[in-house]
C-alpha cells in the first residue's frame, strides 16, 4: 500500500489569493498515505509562492492562461503520476482520502478504473453542512453507485449523470493511464466537471465510488461557485448540459429547478 503513494499526485489549483490555501495544503500533507503535492497556477501571488517555499512544494506556473478550463487541463496533463487529484484550493481532504481510494482501486475487477470519487460534506465557516436539498438529490442520483460501487456500463455511467451532476469534482482521482490526455471544455466555467464526466462515460472503464465522506467542500460568498450562482452563470451552463441529455422543455424544467435549489442553499 505505501508504495502506491508514488503513483499519485495532488495537483493544487491555486488562483490569485485564497485565505484557505494553507489549510488545504496541510490536509494533503497529513494524509495517512503520502502523495506528491504540486501547486499549479496561472496567477502566482506572493502568498502562493511563500507557501510553496514553506512546505517545500513544487510550484508550476502556467504561462498560457486562457481561463479555468485551461488551468485544469494544464495541471492534469503536466502531472507525471499515474493517478492525479485536481485539488480546489479552498477544500479540505480528510486524512484517509488516499488510503480509502487506493483500497477501492485494489477491489476493482479489471484495474481499468477511469476515475475514483468519494463522498463529501459542505463546509461553511467552521461547520459542516450535512443536510440540504442538493445533498439529498445527489445521494438519490448516486443510488446505482450505492448498490454497486464499481460501475462500468455506459448506460449506468450516463444514467448517474442524466438528472444532474452528483460527482464532487475535487474528490475525483483520475486514472491517467486509462483516461489518457484530457482537456476540459472552455465552453464552461462552472460545469467543466459535468461535461468531463459525460465524455468519460463514453470510454471503456469504470467509475468507482468510495462511499466515505473524505472531502470538505468549502462554500463561501467569494468562491467561484457562489459567484456563478449569483450571476446565473450556473443556471445557463446547466441548461446547456441538460439540452444534450433531454428534449428542450425537460431541459429547461430541470435547469429551473436546480437554479432554485442553488439559490436556496447558497451562502448569503
Image (tube, rainbow, N blue to C red):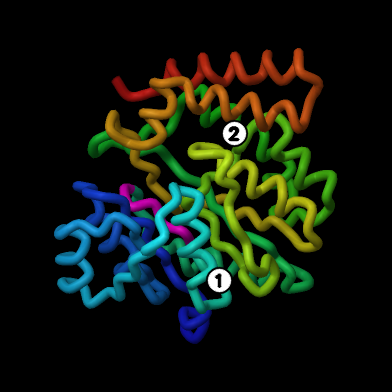
| Residue 83 in sight from this viewpoint | yes
- Most distant residue in the bottom direction: 3
Q: Point out residue 203 in the picture as x, y percentages from the top left corner.
A: 78, 58
| Horizontal relation, residue 156 to residue 227: left or right | right
Against 184, is 106 above or below? below
Label whose residue precedes the other's in the sequence (2 or 1): 1
- The image position of residue 7, as x and y in percent, is 52, 79
- At a point 52% along the width and 45% down the height, the residue shown is 168
Residue drawn 39% across and 21% down?
230
| Residue tagged 1 | 83
C-alpha separation, residue under disc 2 versus residue under disc 1: 25 Å
Q: Nearer the viewer, residue 84 or 192?
A: 192
Q: Main secondary structure of the magenta part?
A: strand
Q: Residues within 10 Å of mark 1 (few under 14, many from 20)?
A: many
The quadrant of the rendering that contains the C terminus is top left
The answer to whether residue 229 is magenta is no
Residue under numbered circle 2: 138
Q: Secondary structure at mark 2?
A: helix
Which picture quadrant has residue 128?
Answer: top left
Neighbours of disc 2 within 10 Å: few (<14), some (14-19), many (20+): some
Q: Give how far across and how far down residue 110 sits, in percent.
A: 78, 72
User: What residue appears at the point 68 percent right and 69 percent down from the top-left corner?
Assistant: 107
Numbered badge on residue 225: none
Examine the rendering and report whether any part of residue 34 can be seen: no
Q: Is residue 154 left or right of residue 161?
A: right
Picture layout, residue 58 above or below residue 101: below
Determine whether, in the image, residue 26 is placed left or right of residue 34: left
Magenta region, residue range? 85-90
Amino acid at each position: 500500500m505505501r508504495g502506491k503513494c508514488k503513483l499519485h499526485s495532488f495537483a493544487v489549483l491555486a488562483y490569485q489569493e485564497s485565505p484557505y490555501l494553507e489549510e488545504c495544503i496541510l490536509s494533503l500533507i497529513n494524509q495517512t498515505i503520502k502523495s506528491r503535492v504540486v501547486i499549479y497556477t496561472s496567477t502566482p501571488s506572493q502568498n502562493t509562492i511563500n507557501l510553496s517555499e514553506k512546505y517545500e512544494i513544487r510550484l508550476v506556473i502556467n504561462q498560457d492562461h486562457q481561463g479555468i478550463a485551461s488551468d485544469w487541463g494544464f495541471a492534469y496533463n503536466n502531472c507525471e503520476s499515474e493517478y492525479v487529484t485536481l485539488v480546489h484550493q479552498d477544500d479540505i481532504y480528510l486524512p484517509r482520502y488516499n488510503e480509502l481510494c487506493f483500497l477501492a482501486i485494489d477491489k476493482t475487477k479489471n484495474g481499468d478504473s477511469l476515475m475514483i470519487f468519494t463522498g463529501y460534506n459542505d463546509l461553511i465557516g467552521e461547520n459542516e453542512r450535512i443536510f440540504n436539498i442538493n445533498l439529498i438529490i445527489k445521494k438519490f442520483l448516486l443510488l446505482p453507485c450505492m448498490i454497486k460501487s464499481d460501475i462500468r456500463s455506459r448506460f449506468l455511467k450516463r444514467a448517474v449523470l442524466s438528472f444532474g451532476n452528483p460527482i464532487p469534482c475535487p474528490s475525483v482521482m483520475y486514472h491517467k493511464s486509462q483516461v489518457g490526455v484530457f482537456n476540459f471544455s472552455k465552453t464552461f466555467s462552472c460545469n467543466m466537471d459535468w461535461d468531463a464526466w459525460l465524455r468519460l462515460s463514453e470510454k471503456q472503464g469504470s467509475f468507482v465510488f468510495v462511499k466515505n465522506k473524505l472531502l470538505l467542500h468549502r462554500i463561501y460568498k467569494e468562491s467561484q461557485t457562489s459567484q456563478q450562482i449569483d450571476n446565473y452563470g450556473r443556471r445557463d451552463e446547466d441548461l446547456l448540459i441538460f439540452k444534450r441529455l433531454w428534449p428542450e422543455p425537460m431541459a429547461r424544467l430541470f435547469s429551473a429547478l436546480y437554479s432554485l435549489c442553488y439559490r436556496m442553499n447558497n451562502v448569503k
